[in-house]
């Protein structure tokens, strides 16, 4: 039997087109698998992004992120 848990795996800064800076949180599902014999295994699952404030982000094929309720496009920046 398996159970899915979610954990934070990364935080980074991103900026929109007018220079506002946001903290982005990368989340990943971990599928916890407990077989009848042997050790518990954690298998990485899907990844999602959100702002530190909790707003959801969609990732795009070009590597940018979009705030779901705002449509602002964010690009990752260095620290």
Image (tube, rainbow, N blue to C red):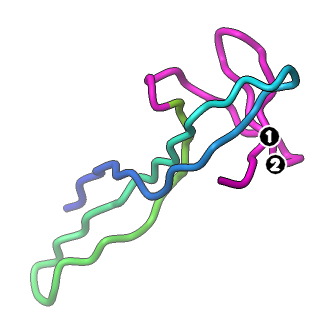
State the residue at coordinates (87%, 24%). Answer: 17
Q: Is residue 13 left or right of residue 43?
A: right
Q: Which residue is mark 1?
A: 75
Q: Residue furthest left?
A: 36
N-term-proximal mark, 2 vs 1 = 2
Residue that appears at 75% across and 33% down: 15
Magenta stretch in the rendered image: 52-79
Question: Residue at the top extreme?
Answer: 69
- Rendered-image quadrant of the N terminus: bottom left
User: Which is nearer the eye, 19 or 7?
Assistant: 19
> Which residue, as the protein is rendered here, is positioned at the far bottom?
38
Q: CA distance from mark 2 to mark 1?
A: 8 Å
58 within the magenta span:
yes
Residue nearer the viewer, 44 or 38: 44
Q: For the residue carrying disc 2, how many other residues have a C-alpha within 10 Å: few (<14), some (14-19), or many (20+)?
A: few
Residue 51: image location, x then y, percent: 53, 30
Per the rendering, the mark at residue 2 is none
Up the image or down, 73 lies above or below 69; here it is: below
In the rendered structure, find residue 63 and report the number of the disc placed on it.
2
Kindly check if marks 2 and 1 are in contact, taking CB atoms under 8 A apart as contact.
yes
Give how far across and how far down residue 75 sits, in percent: 79, 40
**Left or right of residue 39, residue 4 in this image:** right
- Residue 68: image quadrant is top right
Q: Residue at x 89, y 47 (%)?
A: 62
In this view, the mark in front (2 or 1): 1
Q: Residue at x 52, y 48 (%)?
A: 26
| Relative side of 62 to 35, left or right | right
């Amino acid at each position: 039997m398996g159970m899915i848990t979610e954990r934070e795996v990364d935080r980074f800064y991103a900026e929109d087109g007018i220079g506002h800076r946001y903290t982005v949180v990368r989340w990943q599902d971990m599928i916890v698998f407990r077989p009848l014999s042997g050790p518990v295994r954690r298998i990485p699952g899907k990844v999602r992004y959100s702002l530190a404030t909790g707003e959801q982000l969609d990732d795009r094929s070009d590597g940018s992120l979009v705030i779901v309720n705002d449509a602002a496009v964010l690009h990752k920046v260095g620290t």
